[in-house]
Amino acid sequence: MAEVLTTKEAAAYMRLSTDTLKRLARSGRLLAAKAGRQWRWRKVDLDEFLTSGGLYVRQVEDEAYVADCEVRAQERRLSPEELKARLGVQ
């Protein structure tokens, strides 16, 4: 089983701030798991990110997951007004 790190441990290992680490995870560039408010990081995923020069993209075979990620990425590009209109929120 892969070693699992807390956010502080992962940030120290990567020599990044915790905010940068979380931003990489939210953008999908770095693989992480979030349960409630806590993030967890597999050391092997951090190593892969480093050895690939920050271009780590996990291969995903689940087409529904890929489609969901594409929708979320598109939503992040919308302005707050456009997002509210798309969601039907006033």
Image: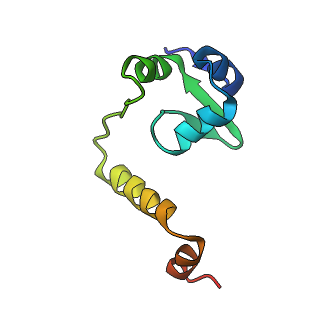
For the point 54% across and 70% down, the residue is 79
For the point 46% across and 23% down, the residue is 45
Q: 5 and 64: which one is in front?
A: 5
Q: In the visual, does 6 lie left or right of 27?
A: right
> Quadrant where the C terminus lies?
bottom right
Number of numbered discs on residues: 0
Residue 41: image x %, image y %?
A: 57, 26
Residue 5: image x %, image y %?
A: 63, 20
Residue 48: image x %, image y %?
A: 41, 20
Residue 67 drawn above or below residue 50:
below
Q: 15 and 85: which one is in front?
A: 15
For the point 31% across and 46% down, the residue is 62
Colour scheme: rainbow
Residue 73, image quadrant: bottom left
Residue 79 drawn above or below residue 6:
below
Residue 23 drawn above or below residue 2:
below
Q: In the visual, does 79 lie left or right of 19?
A: left
For the point 71% across and 23% down, the residue is 8
Residue 60: image x %, image y %?
A: 32, 39
Q: In the visual, does 1 lie left or right of 65?
A: right
Residue 62 drawn above or below residue 9:
below
Q: 19 and 5: which one is in front?
A: 19
